[in-house]
Amino acid sequence: MSGMFCNVLKFENEVKAAIQPMDHKNIDVDIPWFKERVSTMENISIYIWERMKDTMEDPDRLFEVTVQEREGSRVSYRGE
């Protein structure tokens, strides 16, 4: 046991892996997951949640994903 809640570097890499497919993309066209969904902030948070669950070493530690477009405009998702 290291005494850490999580390794921040490892967590940062897991987050990057989850959001990287959206970087500089037209998500409605370039990401198959959004072909059947509207690219709302809510759906983007669900997409990130699902990718994090798939890429995290310990996905049970994932509590919440928050997407913020601008100050005062954000949505959080905690799974189903």
Image (cartoon, grey):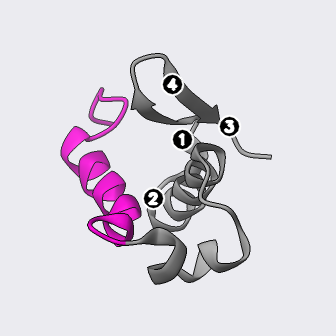
Disc 4 from disc 1: Cα separation: 25 Å
Q: Give the quadrant of the N terminus.
A: top left
| Mark 1 nearby-residue class (10 Å; few <14, some 14–19, many ≥20) | few
Q: Residue furthest left?
A: 9
Q: Are marks 1 and 3 in contact (CB under 8 Å)?
A: no
Between marks 4 and 1 in the image, the one whose residue lies nearer the viewer? 4
- Which residue type does callout 2 highlight? Met
Q: CA distance from mark 4 to mark 3?
A: 17 Å
The first of marks 4 and 2 along the sequence is: 2
Query: Picture coordinates of residue 75 (x, y %)?
Result: 59, 31
Residue at the spot 54% in from the left edge and 41% down from the top edge? 61
Return the mark for residue 78: 3
Task: Give the mark nearer the N terminus: 4 vs 1.
Answer: 1
Nearer to us: label 4 or label 3:
4
Instruction: Say what amino acid the circle numbered 4 marks.
Output: Ser
Left or right position of 38 against 68: right
Disc 3 on helix, strand or loop? loop
Secondary element under disc 1, as helix, strand or loop, is: helix
Query: Which is more N-terminal, label 2 or label 1?
Result: 2
How many discs mark residues in the rendered view? 4
Q: Earlier in the sequence, mark 3 or mark 2?
A: 2
Q: Which residue is mark 4?
A: 73
Task: Residue at 26% x, 67% y: name it.
Answer: 24
Question: Which secondary structure, mark 2?
Answer: loop
- Where residue 56 is drawn, which disc sits there? 2
- Outermost residue, right side: 80
Check whether the beta carbons of the residues at disc 3 and disc 2 lie within 8 A of each other.
no
Circle 1/circle 2 CB separation < 8 Å: yes
| Element on which disc 4 rests | strand
Type of amino acid at the residue the image marks with label 3:
Arg
Q: Which residue is disc 1 drawn over?
A: 61
Query: Mark 1 and mark 3: span between their CA atoms?
Result: 11 Å
